[in-house]
Image (cartoon, rainbow, N blue to C red):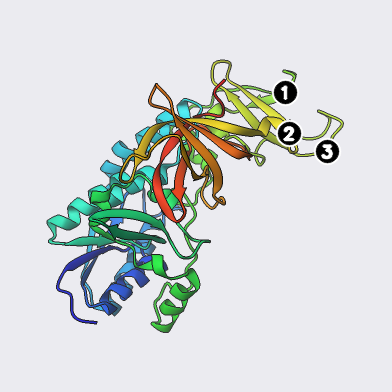
Amino acid sequence: MGVNDDKIIVGLSGGVDSSVTAYLLLEQGYNVEALFMKNWDEADDDKYCTASKDLEDAQKVSDQLGIKLHTVNFSHEYWEDVFEHFLSEHKKGRTPNPDVLCNQRIKFKAFLNYAKNLGAKKIATGHYARISKVNGSFLLKCGLDKNKDQSYFLHLLDKNQLSQSLFPLGEIDKNQVREIAKNNNFVNADKKDSTGICFIGERPFADFLTTFLPKEQGNIINKNGDFIKHHHGLPFYTIGQRKGLEIGGGFSDSQEPWFVAEKILESNEIVAVQGDDPLLYHNTLIADNIHWVDIVPQFPLKCTAKIRYRQASQDCKVIMLENNCLEVNFSESQRAITPGQSVVFYQDDICLGGSVIKSKSNE
């Protein structure tokens, strides 16, 4: 390929995906630099903190590729733009998705602005998604590796952000990424993928949350209203949760496991059910905080949607309500619809945008 003089700054995390992203852009002839972001302030001796090791890996890959590595601390921005909202939602009994907001506010706003000030034409990340330019507009599309597609987490981006971004991994699959890293002897070729909260890491979630939110004991009840046991506080539980309920035998004749079916903020109660109880399933949800990547679609909208990452796309019909909310009616009942999470809409492999789940039905 011919040389491309455009400066591209890659968000280099120290992981294999962003490292291969930088490699592929160099192969395509771009003028590549990298930026390592630290977005959570914690002591380097914190047992869950990987920032120093990640920076070390990022530096080794940068040195190997012969590219400059910049570093920046966006902890203040992350706290104000992502984490305070995260805590506020938990206080309301909802289960937010900080990775979605982090992409919109940190990776494709704070990072993008910082990179532009460094002279970058565009930024690039190791996300498994694609950007397509059609008639002057920029569309967000699913990554070709369906097992790794991350368009769900990117649905809050707009066409301006997409026009200044590159996702080289959208065209290949994870196995190829690992192979490229191994062929180039990258130090992180076998490094496992991070699965924790964006920038916070893979620490025990409930313990982490107690640092910021008080425990407010309440009752766990069955669907008949009978008391089962006490819970530690609504923020520490989510709809559909099984692990951590610690409901043993003796509460019913059935030995099936218990799940969280409902969180009642007003009475500080959790309704728990056993097995595949109908209370866990709903055909309809109401969502607000609507965002469309590009144009607003026509309603009623027939499309597919996901209510969680890695869920198979579900057929649905979307109606715009008078209060600027969406009513999403699914062809098949959905398990554990969770207020605070995102419902993301698709037409084939194009991500149209998304909305935040407000309630599990219109009741």
Q: In the image, is residue 58 above or below residue 358?
A: below
Q: Which residue is mark 1?
A: 223
Mark 1 secondary-structure assignment: loop
The amino acid type of the residue labelled 1 equals Lys
Image depth: mark 1 or mark 2 in front: 2
Disc number placed over residue 271 in the picture, else none = none
**Along the line of sight, the residue nearer the viewer: 300 or 41:** 300
**Residue 36: quarter of image:** bottom left
Left or right relative to 109: residue 283: right
Q: Quadrant of residue 277?
A: top right
Report the front residue among 203 and 149: 149
The residue singled out by tag 2 in the image is 277
Residue under the point 28% across and 73% down: 25
Q: CA distance from mark 2 to mark 3?
A: 13 Å
**Residue at point 28% right, 51% down?**
108
Kindly identify the residue that appears in the image at 32 percent across and 75 percent down: 23
Q: Amino acid at mark 2?
A: Asp
Horizontal and vertical percent position of residue 191: 47, 68
Compared to 21, does 48 lie above or below?
above
Q: Position of residue 248 (x, y in %)?
A: 78, 35
Local crowd at mark 2 within 10 Å, few (<14), some, or many (≥20)?
A: some
Q: Residues within 10 Å of mark 3 (few under 14, many from 20)?
A: few
Q: Earlier in the sequence, mark 1 or mark 2?
A: 1
Write down the residue under mark 3.
Answer: 255
Q: Mark 3 or mark 2, which is nearer the start of the sequence?
A: 3
Q: Are marks 1 and 2 in contact (CB under 8 Å)?
A: yes
Identify the residue at image location x=38%, y=82%: 184
- Viewer-closest of 141 and 238: 141
- Whether label 2 touches label 3, CB < 8 Å: no
The outermost residue toward the top is 267
